[in-house]
């Protein structure tokens, strides 16, 4: 006779699983509408309102797909144009939202310099002090050379100003900075209640976890009876989100501290 075994696991969630209610590019979020020739000096934009729907500051370049930086060809993944944020540069846009609801700001980024690059993403008004996102630009690119980033926020007013800022100041090359494209906003619905299903032998259980967006974890236990000397234990995520190209999972639960304990009296454990 095989003794009952209990499986202990710590479950947490990495991010909200949200459905899109109304989403899409910001007005001129793909930067296909560009400055007038009189508002540019080479690729550098010289007027703060030269790019329709955007307000700019700092060293901003308007890049056409195929432009060269030295021996490197700059490629834009969607459309023909993007902007590059150089020294202490920022782009801003005001959009109408529904106060109190949660939104996700998404955009595509490509590094153009060897130096460490990061972006400061913020939304105003904001009732919480020092609530902004510092996003380091990674060196692991997707297949098209660009990465997609997302930053969530709660709207504290009927209209907000979205800002993407490159805080770096490069003395040797003022243009050094990331390319930005496809800036979009997505309305987040109430988070789903993800759960993990656990199978062992002929037994199974489900462990739900409800996230409130502030982090946390949940302890769980699963009592099962081994059916052989080697019993397979399986964890299955009931809800998950994949990239559009199905190259990997973006959202889902994290398992940690998994322990297997042999018990003689499972009824006492469940009591």
Image (cartoon, rainbow, N blue to C red):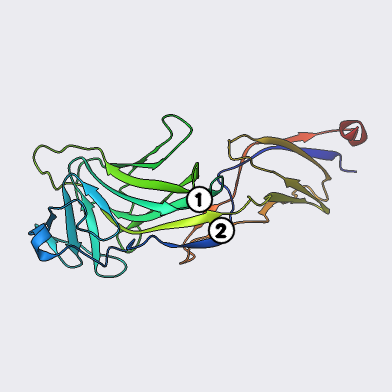
* Residue position marked by numbered label 1 in the rendering: 103
Q: Nearer the viewer, residue 31 or 138?
A: 31
- In the figure, 131 relative to 98: above or below? above
Q: Nearer the viewer, residue 136 or 130?
A: 130
Say whether residue 259 is visible.
no
* Residue position marked by numbered label 2 in the rendering: 241
Q: Nearer the viewer, residue 52 or 21?
A: 52
Instruction: List the single residue furthest toward the bottom.
Output: 79
**For the residue carrying disc 1, how many other residues have a C-alpha within 10 Å: few (<14), some (14-19), or many (20+)?**
many
Q: Nearer the viewer, residue 32 or 125?
A: 125
In three-dimensional space, the C-alpha distance between marks 2 and 1, rounded to whole angstroms, equals 17 Å
Q: Is residue 12 left or right of residue 83?
A: right
Q: Are marks 2 and 1 in contact (CB under 8 Å)?
A: no
Residue drawn at (92%, 35%) of the image: 267
Residue drawn at (10%, 37%) of the image: 171
Identify the mark nearer the N-term, 2 or 1. 1
Quadrant for the N terminus, please.
top right
Quadrant for the C terminus, please.
top right
x then y, percent, for residue 175: 14, 48
x then y, percent, for residue 102: 54, 48
Say whether residue 189 is visible.
yes
x then y, percent, for residue 111: 25, 51
Provide the secondary structure element on which disc 2 rests: strand
x then y, percent, for residue 124: 40, 40
């Amino acid at each position: 006779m095989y003794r009952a075994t209990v499986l202990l696991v710590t479950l947490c969630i990495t991010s909200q699983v949200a459905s899109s209610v109304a989403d899409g590019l910001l007005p001129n979020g793909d930067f296909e509408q560009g400055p007038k020739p009189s508002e540019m000096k080479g690729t550098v934009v010289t007027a703060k309102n030269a790019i329709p729907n955007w307000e700019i500051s700092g060293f901003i370049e308007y890049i056409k797909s195929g432009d060269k930086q030295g021996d490197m060809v700059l490629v834009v993944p969607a459309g023909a144009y993007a902007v590059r944020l150089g020294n202490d540069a920022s782009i801003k846009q005001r959009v109408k939202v529904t106060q109190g609801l949660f939104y996700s700001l998404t955009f595509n980024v490509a590094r153009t310099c060897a130096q460490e690059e990061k972006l400061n993403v913020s939304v105003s008004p904001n009732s919480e002090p020092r609530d902004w996102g510092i996003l380091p630009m990674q060196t692991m690119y997707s297949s098209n050379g660009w990465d997609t980033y997302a930053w969530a926020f709660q709207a504290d007013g009927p209209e907000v100003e979205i800002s993407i800022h490159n805080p770096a100041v490069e003395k040797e090359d003022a243009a050094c900075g990331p390319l930005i494209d496809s800036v979009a906003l997505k309305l987040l619905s109430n988070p789903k209640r993800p759960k993990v299903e656990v199978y062992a032998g002929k037994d199974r259980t489900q462990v739900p976890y409800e996230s409130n967006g502030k982090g946390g974890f949940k302890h769980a236990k699963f009592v099962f009876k081994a059916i052989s000397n080697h019993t397979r234990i399986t964890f299955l995520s009931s809800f998950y989100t994949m990239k559009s190209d199905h190259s990997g999972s973006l959202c889902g639960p994290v398992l940690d501290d998994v322990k297997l304990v042999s018990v003689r009296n499972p009824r006492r454990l469940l009591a």
